[in-house]
Image (cartoon, grey):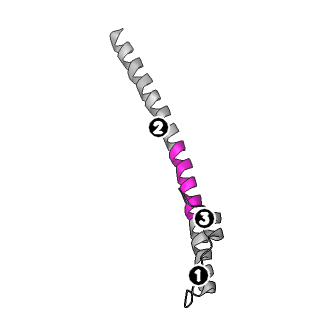
Amino acid sequence: MVLSPDDIHNKEFSTKLRGYNIDEVNDFLEQIIKDYQITLKQNKDLQERLDSSEGKLKYFNELKDSLNQDRKSTRLN
């Protein structure tokens, strides 16, 4: 399961005697959420660029195949 920023934000921890400082934990979780949101956006952007590049690659491979086919048929004539 991939965590969302909301999952991190809404995570509750129980407290015990001599436990962690709640404010420090919350501040750290807020920083993690911000960094995680940036990482998710970067991942999405990279996926979009990859999809676009794969589309272009497919187009140029089809163009290359077409040109090769035309060249072969020109040789035969």
Residue where numbered disc 2 is placed? 57
Q: Residues within 10 Å of mark 3 (few under 14, many from 20)?
A: some
Q: Element under label 3?
A: helix
Residue 75 point in image, percent of width and height: 34, 14
Task: Please identify the quadrant where the C terminus is shown.
Answer: top left
| Image location (x, y in percent) of residue 52 | 54, 43
The outermost residue toward the left is 76
Q: CA distance from mark 2 to mark 1?
A: 47 Å
Q: Residue furthest bottom?
A: 18
Q: Quadrant of residue 13?
A: bottom right
Please state the extent of the stretch shown in magenta in the rendering: 37-52
The picture places residue 63, in percent across and down from the top left corner, at 46, 28
Q: Which residue is mark 1?
A: 25
- Nearest to the observer: residue 11 or residue 73: 11
Name above or below for residue 15 compared with residue 63: below
Mark 3 and mark 1 lie on one chain; the one further toward the N terminus is 1
Looking at the picture, tell me which residue is in the foreground, 21 or 45: 21
Residue 48, magenta (yes or no): yes
Relative height, residue 2 to residue 74 (above, below): below
Residue 56 sits inside the magenta stretch: no
Taking the spot 64% from the left edge, 70% from the top edge, the residue there is 9
Residue 37's disc number: 3
* Residue kind at label 2, given as amino acid type: Leu
Q: Determine the residue positioned at 42% across, 28% down.
A: 64
